[in-house]
């Protein structure tokens, strides 16, 4: 019968059909995995780009587990570090870029310190306006989560958790120092680097770092009438790559100091349960995961070579003292975001909070 | 293996997949590093990873082309090549921060201590973990080729035929 003949398929065509089906299955499975990975990364991008508020009027919630977090209101002294570490002395010999630790743990002299402490408000204003009108070449990220502030001695705190080995922490400390200087001043800052295996960037340390060993450096030489600065810095050998000690080890070391301000600040980081790496900062009641800017030169890097690696501390400070390029404006803009978050947490009481750019950033980003 | 390398179609397929996989890894790294293609492993390891994953996918397509008997194995290998590429990308992108990995781990209920430990472990052991992924790709490929060749014979005309091929 003709109809039966037309319906029957030869073994060869069956084999062809099966083969096509298999090819299709491969394509579908690879596509499924790729699309799932892509949607996952899109989710990460969304988290970066949108402000997420995890707060209601009476209780603070953890975004992932809805656990109620305590409000920290502590009376405590802060930790004052030492000026010199015998096992991690300043390195004075001149070394080549990429393998450079020249000047590490050296205290900034008065002129250098003044670049941070006495930066003109006009720089913050100009950079803030550049951020608002999107004329910065580098990205500045305003994402923050609302968290309970750590109140110490009646003042909200800026909590910093980072690692001396980390490249993003290295870049971020410049902006942090500029931001903090608007609410108080540093009596000492130190020259530092990210690890040789993680771009070897020139940076600032809050205190001399245990750059030869795994340790936790606590405290800074910062004072302010408006805020506290609680600096927790993980250290590991600077000649290797990025490293971070286990969080329980860090907590154990912090708890051994018996300082409740540091103990509670670190406990809050653990309780928030959203740590994704360093740097991790809390500015009053705004929490930032990662650095708030990607600023390694005058343009976003297109490869693994970062222009900042090839700059000395003097060159960075020189650019910050008279900003005239994208690198320096981005550092000020990154500082502006931190300033806006802090202003929102202290009721805009500091003079810097009245800068039009800061008011506009606060409003735009909803801090 | 010779069959893959002497066939223009499979050769083109291999190159195209290798390039796609390379950009896929680059994309994962860029998202993880806040928009930067920042790597702390030797670049050649990335090339090896994309090449080995592409080889595995090409082998899987080749085994299906040769015989329907190996279709399941072929599909599995194809999927495995995408998985190893993704894992390799995650390992490579792990540094100071690892948002993609963190989202996955928090998503499956790992807490902050577990997440931070995973980030540190991957960041510190990147090189040899990436090496393991590459070796895994090659082992899977070797296993598949072994299976396929055991079911094949070379005819007088030099062409590969399979003992189990449907006629």
Image (spheres, rainbow, N blue to C red):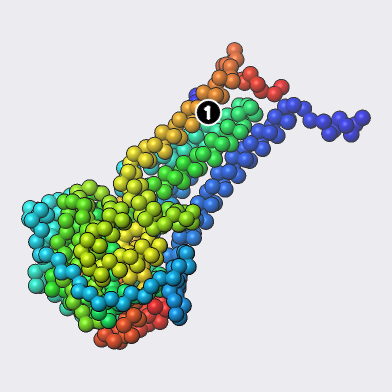
Where is A306 relative to A177, above or below? above
Q: Nearer the viewer, residue A190 or A285?
A: A285
Spot the residue most to the top: B156
Q: Nearer the viewer, residue A271 or A309?
A: A271
Q: What residue lies at 13% left-to-right and 70% top-to-bottom?
A: A188
Q: What residue lies at 43% left-to-right and 40% top-to-bottom?
A: B50
Position of residue A218 measured from the top left corner of the image (x, y, whole percent): 20, 64
Number of dots carrying numbers: 1
Q: Quadrant of the C terminus of chain B?
A: top right
Left or right placement of residue A59 versus residue A304 in this view: right
- Whether residue A71 is visible here, answered yes or no, is yes
Left or right placement of residue A22 versus residue A330 in this view: right
**Among the 4 quarters of the image, the one containing residue A115:** bottom left
Q: What residue lies at 17% left-to-right and 54% top-to-bottom?
A: A211
- Whether residue A194 is visible here, answered yes or no, is no
Give the SS element for disc 1.
helix
Name the residue that disc number 1 marks: B144
Which chain is mark 1 on?
Answer: B
Where is A186 relative to B73, above or below? below
Left or right placement of residue A115 versus residue A25 in this view: left
Position of residue A27 measured from the top left corner of the image (x, y, whole percent): 59, 42
């Amino acid at each position: 019968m003709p109809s039966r003949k037309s319906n029957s398929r030869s073994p060869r065509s069956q084999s062809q059909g099966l083969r096509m089906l298999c090819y299709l299955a491969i394509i579908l499975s690879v596509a499924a995995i790729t699309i799932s990975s892509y949607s996952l990364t899109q989710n990460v991008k969304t988290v970066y780009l949108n402000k997420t508020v995890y707060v209601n009027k009476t209780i603070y919630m953890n975004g992932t587990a809805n656990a109620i977090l305590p409000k920290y209101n502590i009376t405590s002294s802060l930790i004052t570090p030492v000026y010199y570490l015998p096992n991690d002395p300043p390195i004075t010999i001149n070394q080549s870029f990429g393998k450079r630790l020249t000047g590490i743990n050296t205290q900034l002299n008065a002129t250098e310190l003044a670049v941070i402490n006495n930066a003109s408000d006009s720089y913050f204003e100009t950079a803030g306006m550049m951020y608002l009108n999107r004329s910065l070449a580098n990205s500045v990220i305003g994402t923050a989560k609302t968290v309970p502030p750590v109140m110490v001695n009646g003042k909200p705190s800026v909590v910093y958790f980072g690692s001396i080995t980390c490249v993003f922490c290295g870049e971020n400390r410049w902006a942090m120092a500029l931001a903090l200087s608007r609410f108080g001043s540093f009596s000492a800052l130190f020259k530092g680097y990210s690890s040789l295996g993680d771009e070897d960037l020139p940076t600032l340390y809050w205190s001399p770092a245990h750059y030869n060993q795994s340790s936790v450096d606590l405290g800074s030489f910062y004072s302010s009438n408006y805020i506290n600065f609680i600096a927790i810095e993980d250290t590991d050998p600077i000649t290797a790559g990025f490293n971070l000690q286990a969080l329980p080890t860090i907590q154990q070391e912090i708890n051994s100091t018996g300082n409740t301000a540091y103990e509670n600040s670190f406990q809050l980081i653990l309780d928030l349960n959203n740590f994704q790496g360093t740097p991790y900062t809390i500015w009053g009641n705004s929490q930032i995961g990662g650095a708030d800017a990607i600023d390694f030169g005058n343009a976003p890097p297109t490869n693994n070579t970062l222009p900042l690696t090839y700059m000395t501390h003097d060159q960075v400070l020189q650019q910050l003292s008279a900003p005239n390029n994208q690198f320096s404006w981005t550092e000020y803009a990154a500082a502006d975001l931190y300033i806006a978050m802090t202003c929102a947490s202290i009721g805009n009481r500091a003079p810097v909070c009245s800068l039009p750019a800061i008011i506009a950033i606060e409003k735009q980003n909803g801090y | 293996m010779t069959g893959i390398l002497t066939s223009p179609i499979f050769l083109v397929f291999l190159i195209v997949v290798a390039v796609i996989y390379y950009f896929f890894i680059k994309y994962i790294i860029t998202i993880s590093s806040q928009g930067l293609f920042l790597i702390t492993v030797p670049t050649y390891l990335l090339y090896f990873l994309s090449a080995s994953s592409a080889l595995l996918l090409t082998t899987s397509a080749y085994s299906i082309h040769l015989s329907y008997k190996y279709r399941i194995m072929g599909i599995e290998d194809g999927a495995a090549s995408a998985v190893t590429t993704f894992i390799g990308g995650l390992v490579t992108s792990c540094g100071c921060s690892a948002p993609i990995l963190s989202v996955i781990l928090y998503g499956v209920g790992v807490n902050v201590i577990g997440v931070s430990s995973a980030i540190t472990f991957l960041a510190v052991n990147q090189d040899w973990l990436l090496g393991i992924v590459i070796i895994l790709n090659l082992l899977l490929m070797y296993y598949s080729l072994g299976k396929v060749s055991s079911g094949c014979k070379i005819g007088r005309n030099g062409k590969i035929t399979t003992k189990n091929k449907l006629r």
